[in-house]
Image (cartoon, coloured by chain):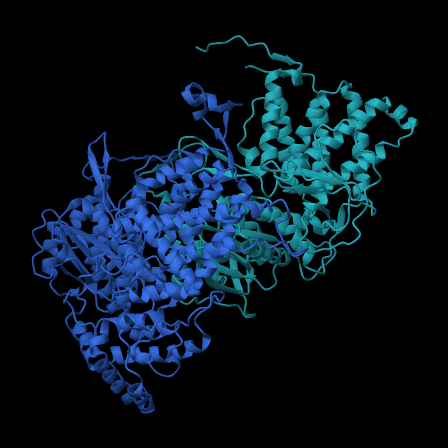
Amino acid sequence: LPMAFRGVNARRHIGLQQLSSLASAGRTFLGPVKSHKFIVDESTNQSTLICSAVRLLESLDLTSAAGQLLNETIQAQNKEFKTGMSTLLFLVGAWSSAVVECLQQNVPISAIVSVMSEGLNSCCERVQCLQISIHDVKKELCSSRVRPNAFECRAHQVGCDSLLNPQDLLCFQERISAPEVIPESSCSHQGDDCHFNKGLVSPLVAFGSAASLVKPAGDRSSSVIPRSGVSTSGCIKQKLTHSRYFSTLGKNHFSSQQGNFWGHSLRPSADPCECCDLGHLAMALSHGNRTGIKLLQSIVAYQQERAECSGSSQLNITEIVTCPLLGLPESCSCVSRGFVTLVSPEQAAVIKQFKDKPLRILLVDGDLTEQYRHLGFNRPHNVRTILEHPNLEGGRAGDTWLSRMLDILVGFEVSLVLVKGSVCKNLRDRCTASRILVVGPVPQDVLCAFGEVTGAQPVTYLSQLNPSCVGNGAQAGLWEASDGRAMDLGELVPVQINVRGIPLLTAVLTTAVASKVQLLEDQFWTSVYRLHHALEDGKVFPGGGAVELLCLSHIQVLTEQPVRPAKAGKEFPSPWLAAPVAEYKPLVLQALASGWKRYLSVVMCNMAKALSELEACALVDHHLRKAADSGSPSAYILELFRRGDLLGSGSGPFADHNEGLRVYDNVAAKTEAWRRALDLVLLVLQTDAEIITGPRRNELLNSPMSSEFMFL
Amino acid sequence: MSRLEAKKPPLFISELLTKDTACQLLLLLSRIFKSSYGPAGRLKQLHSGVGGCVCTTSQSSALLRHLSISNAMFRVLTASVQNHVSRFSDCGLFTAILCCGLIESFRSLNVASCTVIKITRHLLSWCMDYLKSEACGCRVSVDFSSIETLACLVRSVLTSKPACMLNKTEVEHLTMLVLKAFLFTVPCHVETNAVLGKCVIVPVKGRRVMDSTVLPGLLIETPEIHLGTPLAVKRTGSNMIKIAVFCVSLSGDSFSPEEGTIAVHHGISLEMSELNQLLNVGKQLVNDEVSLVVCQKVIHPSLKQYLKENHVMAVDRAGLSQMEPLSRMTGSKPIASIHLLSPGCYGSLKDVSIERVASKHFVHLIPEDTVICSLILCNRTETAWDELKGVCETAEHVLQLTMKEPVALLGGGCTETHLASYIRHKSSSLSTSTFKDLGCSQTQYQLVADGFCRSLESVARSLNRDGGEILTDVVYGHCWFVPSGFLSVSNWSDVVSKCGCGINGNTEDLGWRILEGQSCSPVIQGCPKEPSVKVTDFLTLDCFAAKCSGLQVALETANLILDLSYIIEDQN
């Protein structure tokens, strides 16, 4: 095999330049106000509407090594978190251009690598003090939303509690006597280091040791949530949930849903008191994605009601599917119980005949075609069939398979078949004619959900069928939008397949614009995963740039710190990694900081909070100075956050909606995005040569680039 | 009609090492290896140039796998380094750099290659005797009763490849995991011939390194199993789980042989008859009260269904790499044919559970007393994971080699400089009879010995990056690093802090001097001493066996290449 070799010019590192130019295309995707992009394919003149880093990379030319590595990194983040890819992409660009600048100033590579990676570690540790536990966030959000009728809520809740447990009456009195909640606007006037505590305290917990949520963090301390607070919180949480969902109101709500089986769409309630606090959290994490969030809120409400029975409080992603529906206005988007999918008009006609009859259901976890064999089955190529007595009356072989399959289905009285893979069209038509509904392809999670509730066991071949494989009790009906119009969508008809007690929910995403289908789906799933990860982490970061601001202020501190002399004997990496750090440290730390600073300023520009990046930087610098002067940057930044006075907030896109609404960020997704971005930049930075193997070598030999290569 | 073509005459190439292209290639190879060496080594991107996977690495095994060299002479070099790596895992770059260095320094000498070979063999035997003697100043004994030295060995391997993208916490975490995994593979009850077990690496890509963990027993990925469903596994009288392991595919397609054609009559389905046989196997398994069936390949869905209905758990697609440890762990014999099912094939397990790592589900097979363990290895990207996997395997191998011979060599370039100064010292006081035995003059001997020492030192020098300076001291002969920007300093003791391996600090004046590439008059010095205090924690250590072999392989290969006079290439 031939091979070509190209050295990388250290000063003008080509890989880093490629990274920063690829990343520059994604800057408009930062922050809550994103600009969409049209990607136009010049050969076909087709265009795609995109609004995320993942979709952008799908349409960029990534044949260069750096491009491949970038794609790999973004895909890994997407697979793991489904959020944070735009941040990752932007920081890759910002950091690689900052590193190129360092190289131009003759900073040794080893100094860049060690200072930047240690700087990021230090920042990630530092920002831990900003983390807010989900429990506290829920209370906080509840308090900020429910404030007008906080007292009623409390009274109502305690009333319920006391029925359950008379001892709580004492608690009730305590609570009544607790100081009334200070409106948040007044917090700023108090001016001492402690005041934001009170801001955090919700009306429901303004008693006892509840002021344990966030203590003013001394700059050196990393943990702010004292252990003692946790137990208190735990007990309050229980009360909260009880009062919320076992109140008469909640009970009615739940049973009415049970009764109204075909009340197909779940709605978020207009009453904030009824709305669950996870819904608020979802909203605070969504950063302005409206349609998706309404759906997610109803999903959360539904899952929480179910969780009351099962006891889990996580968002169960495997119980959510989406069904994009083209042709209805976006306002028709809603969440339906069971599985909503599109079928042909003929199949829809069969469904109409089903009415409310319980159906026998079969699940197939492969394709439903004659040629299909399970994975790992190697088709024989050397088997010859000999036909000794040709039977001219017999039909073709395919027909016998079709009728055999149909016989099996009829024999087991199956009326509904959900298929994971593709379905033979002839079989589908024959089944439809025999009033058997065959639906596919269906996601694995849907099969599982139906299997669990109906008792159906998935099979790969219909010949495997025995009575225990068939489930019972499924129902199918036509799906209707909230206003009853749904049927005129042309070729495909939305139908809803349901079983009593199935946890599965379908988010029906309607839109009238074909190019937005993908976009809406992506946005919906982003919201879902943000909430999911927040619950999994058990904590969130304050949003709106708070974390980045603290990183910047921490880097200022680091820059001023003297380089620690290596402690004798106890310091690993050997001297080979100890570059002359002291000399270059301020420069490299500045490069690290420039990533976040540019991030903040671009977000502000995208949101039209600042006219130019320069103006935005000035605002960031202003806050940094004040943070440093305050003596406790983390406290200063938290206070800004509480006041809603951080960089972007105040009169943001939600201004009309809710002034007090806070924005939160995912913890792991964010810090991992940083780490992955820096890892990629440092990986490319440490690369000094490209070795190209395989057939491309001859092309290179004749190309204008051939002078850059050595051919072996 | 066939067409015959006249045979081309073979190509006859002479003057191998003086050719321009050969020199260039040698320089380029040497540059690739040297620049990749060490914890601050530069990475190489290996890719096809048309998109697809990019391998970013500084490991010799990965580099050599991708490097394709047309020159037969250098294929000898890469082949012998690859052979060394396949046996020892570690010290591949050391071997390659040393070999290139030896060829470079000897080919320009005006000494007959047979004389060079005789002298270098003599020098090599000195080195080996010294390294194996108790008096050797650059080795430390490894104490298996404490963890420190072992951790140093592992840590040195882990930090030597920057493409793993590990920070300090992650290095510490993985060091402990690798050690833990190694300890699992050591049998508790040692009989006459103890055999080490095996650590199977389970890939989980895309996750944080800190999510990595070690579990005893084996993990087999099973996408279908869900956490919610409790495992109901039948147990035998002695509360064990009876397991059958198949290495033959149970997918129902084995009627199709590789060659020839089968003719069947219409209406006969080979698939059906094969499936019936599989179901008979299933029946026998149920009769034999097997409660867990593991198949290397695929199990037919119908057989799976049958087994499930009879409360037998079936796990398929275990993969080839799991078979050997699985049969060792359970005492079962992998069943290679569905027609040969004897009760003696079955093995037993203590427990089975479901593990969830990231988004993957695994069946965890837990044996009674195991030397088999699974290292669930996570790293953020594919590239970094691949590099990390190689590094972890090397570390495990290094521990195994060290167990056989509980010594380690000082790393960070110190062994190389120490050995060079030892050879310089020894060769300066040779008797004339030795020269007569070797059939060379004293000058010739000195030239070759100097070339040998400089090649050793060039390995240490290739640890240098970013224009720093490499020093050595006259007392211990260790290797010291001075970052760039301090070259005008008059007193080296102001700028050095620790030697490369970390054993010596800057406590007394050690008489530092720059380690130059082209020193013509080597400093006459005494025999390098052994460090007085042997700290055992936070040292950079190298695998003894791997380095010794590397030294030998490099020298033998260099000798072989120097001795080549012609290449005859068959052009047909």
- Name the side, left or right, on which A115 lies relative to A329: right
Q: Quadrant of residue B115?
A: top right
- Along the line of sight, the residue nearer the viewer: A504 or B430: B430
- Residue drawn at x 78%, y 24% is B116
Q: Quadrant of residue B176?
A: bottom right
Please provide percent x and percent y for residue A295: 21, 61
- Residue drawn at x 58%, y 9% is B9
Viewer can see residue B377: no
- Along the line of sight, the residue nearer the viewer: A220 or A85: A220
> Does residue B465 lie above or below B170 as drawn?
above
Considering every residue shown, the one lying at the far top of the view is B6
Chain letter for the blue part = A
- Residue drawn at x 45%, y 57% is A554
> Does residue A240 lie above or below A410 as drawn?
below
- Along the line of sight, the residue nearer the viewer: A400 or B251: B251
Chain letter for the cyan part = B
Viewer can see residue A210: yes
- Name the side, left or right, on which B240 lies relative to A265: right
- Along the line of sight, the residue nearer the viewer: A610 or B321: A610
